Image: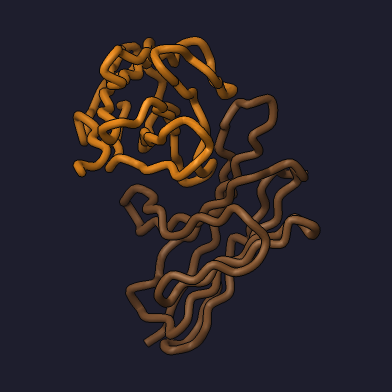
Chain colours: A orange, B brown
C-alpha cells in the first residue's frame, strides 16, 4: 500500500505571496489532517478534513485554509505569506475513526 | 495544564539499556494513544498504538497504558544509537466525536554508543 505523499517537498517563497500544498492520503483513508511544525512550537494542528468537510480546526489565522476533494486528496493554502510561516508542513491520513494516523514526508516552506 | 505533557529531555541512555519515555494527558475520556518517532528533519513515524490498559509489545518496543493515572509510557529495550530521535506522544480524546489528535512536544532520546 502506498504511503501518504506530499508535494512539493520544498518551497521557497517571498513575503506576501501565497502557496498551495498538496497531500494524497493512503488509499481508503478519508481523513486528512494538516500540521505545522517549527522548532519552537512543535506540532501545531491546523485543520482536519473528512469526506470533503472540515471537521476540526486549530487556532490559526484565516490566511490558512484547506479543502478536500472527492478522492480524499487535500490541499492547503496559505495566503499573504509571513516570515513566521516558515515551517515544515505535515499532512497525516487516517480512516477518520480515531485510529492510527500516518504522516507524509512533509513540505518544507521557507519564506524570505 | 497542557493536554499532553512530555519531558523534553534529552534523555541519555547507554547502548543496550532500556529507555523509558513517559507521557501524561489531561482528558480522562481519551481512548486512543500513539507513539511516534521523529528523526531530525524527517516526518513523524508511527511506532506504537495502544487502546486498552496494560502493556502492548512490538519487538523491542513496549507501550504501557494506565487510564486511571492518565499515563502512557514507551519502553525501548536494548537501545541502539539508531533509536536516537524525538519521541512524540499523541492522544485522541474522542470528545464530541471530533477525532482530534493532541500531540505532546516530544522527548529527545540520545543513545550513547
| Residue B74 sits above or below residue A112 on the image | below
Q: Is residue B10 visible?
A: no
Residue A59: x %, y % from top left: 59, 22
Residue B48: percent from left, percent from top? 47, 59
**How many numbered dots are placed on residues in this image?**
0
Q: Is residue A77 left or right of residue A58?
A: left
Q: Residue A27 or A43: which is nearer the viewer?
A: A27
The reply, left or right, for residue A96 in relation to residue B25 is left
The answer to whether residue B101 is left or right of residue B6 is left
Image spot of residue A1 (x, y percent): 20, 44
Q: In the figure, is residue A102 to the left or right of B87?
A: left
- Residue located 46% across and 72% down the image: B61
Q: Quadrant of the C terminus of chain B?
A: bottom left
Q: Quadrant of the N terminus of chain B?
A: top right
Q: Closer to the camera, B2 or B65? A: B65
Q: Name the spot of residue A45 as percent of width and height, x first.
A: 52, 31
Q: Is residue B97 above or below residue B82?
A: above
* Image vertical order of residue A38 relative to residue B110, above or below: above
| Residue drawn at x 30%, y 26% as measured from the top left | A112
Residue at 72%, 62% (x, y): give it: B66
Q: Quadrant of residue A38?
A: top left
Point 67% across, 61% down: residue: B53
Amino acid at each position: 500500500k502506498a504511503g501518504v505523499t506530499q508535494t512539493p517537498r520544498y518551497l521557497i517563497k517571498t513575503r506576501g505571496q501565497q502557496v498551495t500544498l498538496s497531500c494524497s492520503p493512503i488509499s481508503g483513508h478519508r481523513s486528512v489532517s494538516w500540521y505545522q511544525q517549527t522548532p519552537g512550537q512543535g506540532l501545531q494542528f491546523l485543520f482536519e478534513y473528512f469526506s470533503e468537510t472540515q471537521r476540526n480546526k486549530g487556532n490559526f489565522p484565516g490566511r490558512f485554509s484547506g479543502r478536500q476533494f472527492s478522492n480524499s486528496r487535500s490541499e492547503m493554502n496559505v495566503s499573504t505569506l509571513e516570515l513566521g510561516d516558515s515551517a515544515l508542513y505535515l499532512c497525516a491520513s487516517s480512516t477518520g475513526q480515531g485510529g492510527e494516523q500516518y504522516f507524509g514526508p512533509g513540505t518544507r516552506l521557507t519564506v524570505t | 495544564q497542557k493536554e499532553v505533557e512530555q519531558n523534553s529531555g534529552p534523555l541519555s541512555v547507554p547502548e543496550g539499556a532500556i529507555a523509558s519515555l513517559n507521557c501524561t494527558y489531561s482528558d480522562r475520556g481519551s481512548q486512543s494513544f500513539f507513539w511516534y518517532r521523529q528523526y531530525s528533519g524527517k516526518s513523524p513515524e508511527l511506532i506504537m498504538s495502544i487502546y486498552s490498559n496494560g502493556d502492548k509489545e512490538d519487538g523491542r518496543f513496549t507501550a504501557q497504558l494506565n487510564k486511571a493515572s492518565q499515563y502512557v509510557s514507551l519502553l525501548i529495550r536494548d537501545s541502539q544509537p539508531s533509536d536516537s530521535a524525538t519521541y512524540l506522544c499523541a492522544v485522541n480524546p474522542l470528545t464530541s466525536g471530533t477525532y482530534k489528535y493532541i500531540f505532546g512536544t516530544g522527548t529527545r532520546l540520545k543513545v550513547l554508543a
